[in-house]
Amino acid sequence: MKRFLSQLNFKNSKSDKEFKNWIKTTTGYSPDNLALYHQAFSHSSVSSKKPGQSVSNERLEFLGDAVLGAIIAEYLFKIFPYKDEGFLTQLRSKIVNGQSLKALALKFGFNHFLKTSLSKDEKAKSSAFGDAFEAFIGAVYMDKGYEKTKRFVFTRIIKNHIDVEGLINTNEDYKSQLQIFCQKHKWKLEYRLIEERKEGANKLYSIQVFINDKPKTKFENYSKKVAEQKAAQLTLEELEQQ
């Protein structure tokens, strides 16, 4: 544990000062509890484990996912007062899906601070950056509270980096598209986890689409959500060509 904490530079070092400056520039707030932000950037591949506890960003990711989802839901609820639940749910999922969060994380420079033992190829295929983004939101929430976190999300993320109108006019939710396609034909649709295997510090998920119990496209990724979306996309393309 001591070794892990020293790796995270919890002491008031030059790197900590740079990290604090980056947090203030990114969020608009000076951090009060720097340890929270260090934890947000600690991937499970480098976490320090002891019985019943793992010091990584996974718990903050869980919290940040809920907080970010609530903030985005409130924002969409207010700007689209006449849209139904389905529209709002789909639009929120476009904003907070893994690929969108990864893109935001890289825009904000998370790649300079994320601590992980993953290889470059593993990081490209994993959800590490998107997870760290959610964990960072969780850290801001724990450090500054809901209202300041909401202000950060509104002013620094949505206003500058989210094209809501553009997202409305694009549909990259292939699972939803495939679901609608199958419902139209009264087909039974399933996503089955064919294999889950350990590769280094990550798990590789193999997901296969089944329609009326017949196997369709299979896709592998370090993110189960990405594997499902890609399998759905390829299956939809195949069905539309038939």
Image (tube, rainbow, N blue to C red):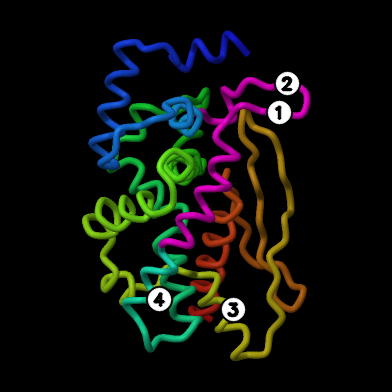
Residue 49, percent from left and from top: 68, 22
Q: Mark 3 or mark 1: which comes first in sequence?
A: 1
Identify which residue is drawn at 55% across, 70% down. 175
Q: Is residue 170 above or below residue 230?
A: below
Helix, strand or loop status at disc 4: helix
- Closer to us: mark 3 or mark 1? 1
Identify which residue is drawn at 47% across, 65% down. 93
Residue 32, percent from left and from top: 39, 30
Closer to the camera, 16 or 94?
Answer: 16
Helix, strand or loop status at disc 1: strand
Q: 10 Å neighbourhood of mark 2: few (<14), some, or many (≥20)?
A: few
Three-letter code for the amino acid on which mark 4 is drawn: Phe
Look at mark 2 in the image and give the residue it sits on: 50
Look at mark 1 in the image and give the residue it sits on: 53
In screen coordinates, is 34 left or right of 231?
left
60 in the magenta segment: yes
Q: Is residue 119 above or below residue 133?
A: above
Look at mark 3 in the image and give the residue it sits on: 179
Three-letter code for the amino acid on which mark 1 is drawn: Gln
- Distance from label 1 to label 2 (Cα)? 5 Å
Closer to the camera, 175 or 210?
Answer: 175
